[in-house]
Image: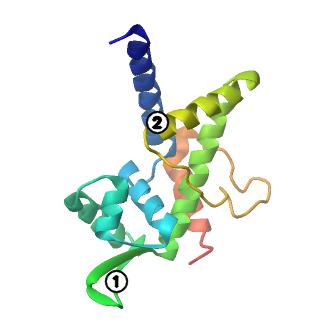
């Protein structure tokens, strides 16, 4: 392995660990795991999806996705229903509560990453963004289109999260945000 490959490996692992730590400690997810947050996000991208298509999209096995779906359904964040055109097919979509929780979590995610971006010197941000995009494509990730972070654009609608009080802040936000409820 070349020195460049070793350095790339080391840097990629450091970045992956840092992102995992951010996701775990500052973003996700109240009562949800990171994988459950990703499950809700994947469902939201397409509105309605089958269990097998969701498992394939998330690159996890059917038994794992089934467990996650059962938990999310019990929490009232998604609903499963038979496809009207083929009763053998079970489809999944978010409930109003699931959509509201996801909006809040995405808002939290963007705020945390905005803080990270602010720590990068302004003159280096473009290069970092370009490198991340190149890396994402090399990893087989395609650009995603997500709704704006905060549907409410009034000042303070998406206030920064205090890490010592993260779960309480998220729970309060979830109770307040019932746009689709």
Residue 83 vertical position relative to residue 35 in the rendered view, above or below: below
The extreme bottom residue here reads 84
Q: Measuring 40% from the left and 16% from the top, which residue is drawn there?
A: 5
Mark 2 crowd level (few <14, some 14–19, many ≥20, 10 Å Cα): few
Please, which colouring scheme is shown? rainbow
Q: Secondary structure at mark 2?
A: helix
Q: Residue 116: percent from the left, percent from the top?
A: 62, 32
The extreme left residue here reads 63
Choose between 169 and 79: the one closer to the eye: 79
Labelled disc at residue 50? none
Counting residues from the N terminus, which is met first, the one under dot 1 or under dot 2? Answer: 1
Which residue has dot 2 on it?
A: 138
Q: Measuring 35% from the left and 77% from the top, which residue is drawn there?
A: 91
**Do we see residue 162 in this rendering?**
yes
State the quadrant of the N terminus: top left
The extreme right residue here reads 155
Mark 1 crowd level (few <14, some 14–19, many ≥20, 10 Å Cα): few
Q: Measuring 40% from the left and 8% from the top, which residue is drawn there?
A: 3
- Please name which of the two marks, 1 or 2, marks the residue nearer to the observer: 2
Q: Residue 130: percent from the left, percent from the top?
A: 63, 32
Q: Residue 52: percent from the left, percent from the top?
A: 28, 67
Residue 164 vertical position relative to residue 69 in the rendered view, above or below: above
Q: Residue 113: percent from the left, percent from the top?
A: 60, 39
Q: Measuring 59% from the left and 60% from the top, which residue is drawn there?
A: 173
**Do we see residue 119 in this rendering?**
no
State the quadrant of the C terminus: bottom right
Labelled disc at residue 81? 1
Marks 1 and 2, how far apart at CA:
36 Å
Q: In this rendering, would 42 be left or right of 156?
A: left
Q: Secondary structure at mark 1?
A: strand
Residue 115 vertical position relative to residue 69 in the rendered view, above or below: above
Choose between 151 and 145: the one closer to the eye: 145
């Amino acid at each position: 392995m070349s020195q460049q490959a070793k350095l790339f490996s080391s840097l990629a692992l450091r970045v992956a660990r840092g992102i995992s730590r951010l996701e775990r400690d500052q973003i996700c997810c109240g009562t949800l795991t990171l994988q459950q947050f990703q499950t809700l996000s994947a469902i939201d991208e397409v509105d309605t999806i089958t269990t097998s298509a969701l498992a394939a999209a998330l690159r996890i096995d059917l038994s794992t996705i089934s467990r996650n779906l059962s938990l999310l359904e019990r929490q009232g964040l998604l609903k499963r229903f038979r496809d009207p055109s083929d009763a053998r097919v079970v489809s999944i979509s978010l409930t109003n509560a699931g959509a509201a929780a996801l909006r809040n979590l995405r808002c939290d995610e963007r705020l945390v990453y905005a803080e990270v971006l602010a720590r990068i010197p302004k003159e280096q941000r473009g290069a970092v963004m370009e490198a991340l995009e190149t890396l994402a494509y090399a990893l087989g990730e395609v650009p995603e289109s997500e709704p704006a972070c905060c549907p409410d654009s009034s000042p303070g609608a998406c206030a920064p999260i205090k890490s010592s009080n993260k779960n309480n802040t998220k729970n309060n936000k979830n109770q307040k945000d019932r746009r689709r409820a």
